[in-house]
Amino acid sequence: MTPNTKGALLALTAFGIFASHDVIIKVLGGAYSPVLIVFFSVLFSFPLAMLYLLRDATPGTLIPKHPWWMAARTVAAVITGFCAFYAFSVLPLAQVYAILFASPLLITILAIPILGEPVKLRRWIAVAVGLTGVLVVLRPGSAELGLGHLAAMISAICGSFASIIVRKIGREERTVVIMLYPMMANFVVMAALLPFVYEPLPLADLGKLGVIALLAWTAGRFLIAAYNVGEAVVVAPMQYSQIIWASFYGLLFFDETPDNPTIIGSAIIIASGLFIVLRESKAPGSEQPVLRTRSRPETGTTPRVSPFLRMDRRGK
């Protein structure tokens, strides 16, 4: 088996696990507030994160070197997590994924003002086509748009913003700083809101919240392994396999069948995202904001993949 084949299979496994993680969020979202789900997801993720962050031997303190960028990233991550969890709770899985798949398009746009990276005409055309695909999924004017659609769009935008900030400051900030600030902020913010929405949790539902943290951690480890053995241009597109899992899980558990606009819009978004990935694979390393975004949109509920991947490579 070639390294790229192995990397692709590991990535497919990772995103399959991530999809299972999202199914549990949707199940719990039918009974509980996203505030409660985010709070316990972060709470159960902390021990797993600590075990790995103890390996970060980079000298320094927990004071960020770029406090304003770190503050912006932290706020964006908290908003992303809450909005994504809410969207999964109220929308069909395939529709949420289709909107979140706009992240590579948004990262390409945000790389211009934040990273100062050039975007040539062909990538601009791909971005425009991809955003048209988002409109096909949302079909404004012909379908009722609710808070779930707005939440999914906000999650995609804020998640892309958080990701591009990591590209800007990631080499200078300690891994532990990049990881902990969004998780700590999520914990504090959700804890402050929890008394307003708290409901007693049966042991079974508490166990499901623990499984969410475990699945996110496991998927992250598989994704790190995928990037360690395969090329980014092969591994990155595997994220689009989540639409297949979403269709399968949606039909199996929620009696959801993707409608034609969702299928067509998803195909347009995925095609434009793949084009951007392929274009970036031929560009210099400094012009690869999408390829260097190693995981799903930042939610601040679980550790992010890219800093861990960098730490793994430093240790080799």
Image (cartoon, rainbow, N blue to C red):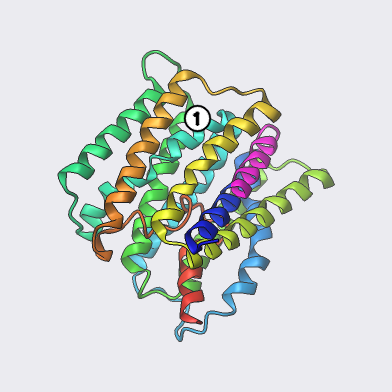
**Image point 69% across, 59% down: which residue?**
44
Residue labelled with disc 1: 95
In terms of image quadrants, where is residue 31? top right
Does the magenta-highlighted stretch encompass residue 137? Answer: no
In terms of image quadrants, where is residue 200? top right
* SS under mark 1: helix
Residue sitting nearer the eye, 161 or 2: 2
Residue sitting nearer the eye, 4 or 252: 4
Residue 201 x/y as whole percent: 78, 44
Depicted 82 relative to depicted 183: above or below? above
Depicted 149 relative to depicted 272: above or below? above
Depicted 67 relative to depicted 136: above or below? below
**Circle 1: residue type:** Gln
Give the quarter of the figure containing the N terminus: bottom right
In terms of image quadrants, where is residue 42? bottom right
Residue 99 x/y as whole percent: 43, 35
Q: Which residues are magenta?
A: 16-32
Horizontal side, residue 5 vs residue 47: left or right: left
